[in-house]
Amino acid sequence: MSAAASAADDRSGRPIEPDDPLMRTYTEIEVTYLLAELAERGRRFGLLWPSATTDSVVDGLVRFGNAPASTVLNLLTLLRSHDNSSEDDTPCDS
């Protein structure tokens, strides 16, 4: 995980804003990996974005319907926290 990604994870649960200076630090390859992780984690929930690509990252924007990379990070944060909370759950006895 890059320093930028770990910094994004340590923002005490608040969403990352599109104009956050951190967004300008991401490289195209980092955003590509984040999109791949989003596709993998989101698939379980029916979250599919087959057209989400980087098409070169300019000022933190990805070709995700012109969404900023912060949208990808915020979605990943939600999915990661769900995965972490699900690990603590015990199966219901029926």
Image (cartoon, rainbow, N blue to C red):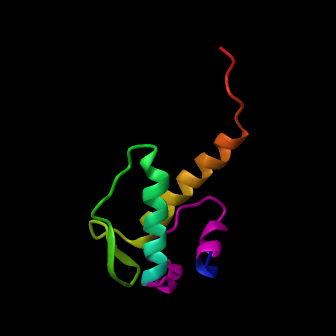
Residue 57 percent location from the top left of the image = 37, 82
From the viewer's perspective, is 65 left or right of 91?
left
Say if the magenta span includes residue 22. yes
The residue located at (45%, 51%) in the rendering is: 42
**Vertical arrangement, residue 81 with respect to residue 9, above or below:** above
The residue closer to the viewer here, 40 or 19, is 40
The residue located at (72%, 40%) in the rendering is: 88
Magenta-highlighted residues:
5-27
Please identify the quadrant where the N terminus is shown.
bottom right
From the viewer's perspective, is 53 left or right of 82?
left
**Vertical arrangement, residue 79 with respect to residue 18, above or below:** above
Tally of numbered discs: 0
The residue located at (61%, 47%) in the rendering is: 83
Residue 39 percent location from the top left of the image = 42, 58
The residue located at (59%, 74%) in the rendering is: 5
Considering every residue shown, the one lying at the far top of the view is 94
Say if the magenta span includes residue 33. no
Please identify the quadrant where the C terminus is shown.
top right
**Vertical arrangement, residue 58 with respect to residue 13, above or below:** below
From the viewer's perspective, is 16 left or right of 68?
right
Residue 14 percent location from the top left of the image = 58, 60
Residue 19 percent location from the top left of the image = 44, 77
Residue 71 occupies which quadrant of the picture?
bottom left
